């Protein structure tokens, strides 16, 4: 099993005729993802790699049952694209764009929550359940080189670091149930603690790995969740960005959200909060498999 995306997930691609969408579409089809339709206004009746194109999401879902939509639109079009998908009743959305205006992404996050829709991103490269399916460009041309099927759930703020931890786990003989790049913006749909809860509920996930960074409350939310006693599975975490504590507050590095506004935003504070809650914390990716082995999670 996995969280959110399985081999039976039926996928729509909004903005399917764009360059990145076309590239990810081919790779997703090659991986076995069930992409059933695409949407580009004004291109209805055409097709891309055998996938039919519609002018609107409503028309697409009238012809094809859809479980998830991968949204490839420019930042200023993200709000209308998400609202169109919500109106069509799609329950899982992946929003790839970065630099979405803060007011728009705040509205999007609130609208998806109110509608009971799960939103991954924005500013994400995707989610993959190895050997089953994926949304977005995560895994590149050949996901099998990086992501092995297994029983470790991974949530990372960074798409690149998602691949790095997948390779570290693979080298140790471990595999992944689902890996999600949750997005690096200050406002995202699902938060890190919500992914932890989903992994906790998944019977085929035995342990959880988190890759965090300075800025936002995500890691503190995880610490509070673990302290509540609602999480029984072992969690290993790496929080990067210790170097930022040598620089002035209010400066972002890498992701827009990787900004220290106060001491609680630092990697040091997050590492301490997680460790005090019982999470295994390390500063080295290579140590994560050995930490998991200490809790009985091994190849």
Image (spheres, grey):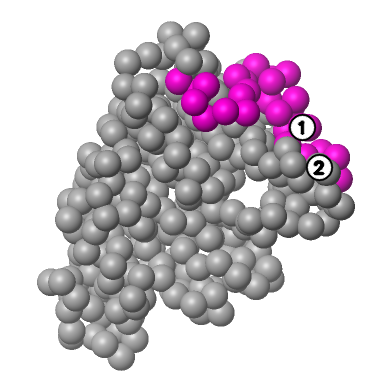
Q: Residue at x 81, y 38 (%)?
A: 264
Q: Would residue 249 be found to the left or right of residue 4 on screen?
A: right
Q: Toward the viewer: 177 or 202?
A: 177
Above or below, 205 against 125 in this view is: above
Above or below, 151 against 155 in this view is: above
Check residue 180 for magenta coloring: no
Disc 2 to disc 1, C-alpha distance: 9 Å
Residue 268: which numbered mark, if any?
Answer: 1
Q: Residue at x 54, y 53 (%)?
A: 183
Residue 202 visible in the displayed image: no
Q: Residues within 10 Å of mark 2 (few under 14, many from 20)?
A: some
The residue positioned farthest toward the left in the image shown: 50
Q: Residue at x 42, y 30 (%)?
A: 168
The segment highlighted magenta reads 262-289
- Asked which quadrant contains residue 60, the reply is bottom left
Q: Main secondary structure of the magenta part?
A: helix
Q: Earlier in the sequence, mark 2 or mark 1?
A: 2
Q: Toward the viewer: 50 or 200?
A: 50
Count of marks overlaid on the render: 2
Residue 245: which numbered mark, if any?
Answer: 2
The spot of residue 21 in percent (x, y) is: 33, 70
The spot of residue 78 in percent (x, y) is: 51, 73
Q: Would residue 38 be found to the left or right of residue 264 on screen?
A: left
Check residue 281 for magenta coloring: yes
The spot of residue 267 in percent (x, y) is: 73, 36
| Cβ–Cβ under 8 Å for marks 2 and 1 | yes
The spot of residue 287 in percent (x, y) is: 52, 21
State the SS at label 2: helix
Q: Would residue 297 be found to the left or right of residue 42 on screen?
A: right
Residue 176 visible in the displayed image: yes
């Amino acid at each position: 099993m996995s969280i959110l995306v399985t081999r039976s997930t039926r996928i729509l691609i909004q903005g399917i005729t764009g360059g990145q969408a076309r590239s990810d579409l081919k790779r997703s089809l090659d991986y076995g993802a069930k992409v059933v339709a695409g949407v580009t206004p004004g291109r209805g009746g055409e097709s891309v790699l055998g996938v039919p194109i519609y002018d609107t999401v409503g028309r697409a879902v009238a012809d094809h049952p859809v479980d998830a939509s991968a949204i490839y639109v420019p930042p200023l079009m993200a709000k209308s694209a998400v609202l169109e998908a919500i109106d069509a009743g799609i329950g899982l959305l992946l929003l790839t764009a970065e630099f979405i205006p803060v007011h728009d992404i705040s509205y999007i996050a609130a609208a998806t929550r109110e509608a009971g829709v799960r939103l991954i991103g924005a500013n994400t490269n995707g989610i993959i359940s190895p050997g089953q399916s994926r949304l977005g460009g995560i895994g590149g041309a050949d996901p099998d080189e990086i992501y092995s099927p297994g029983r470790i759930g991974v949530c990372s703020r960074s798409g690149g670091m998602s691949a790095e931890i997948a390779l570290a786990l693979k080298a140790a003989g471990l595999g992944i149930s689902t890996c999600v790049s949750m997005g690096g913006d200050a406002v995202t749909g699902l938060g890190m603690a919500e992914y932890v809860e989903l992994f906790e509920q998944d019977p085929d996930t035995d342990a959880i790995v988190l890759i965090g960074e300075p800025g936002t409350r995500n890691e503190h939310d995880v610490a509070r969740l673990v302290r509540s006693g609602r999480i029984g599975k072992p969690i290993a975490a790496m929080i990067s960005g210790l170097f930022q504590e040598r620089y002035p507050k209010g400066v972002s590095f890498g992701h827009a959200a990787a900004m220290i506004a106060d001491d609680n935003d630092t990697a040091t504070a997050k590492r301490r909060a997680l460790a005090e809650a019982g999470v295994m914390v390390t500063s080295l990716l290579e140590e994560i498999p050995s930490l998991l082995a200490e809790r009985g999670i091994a190849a």
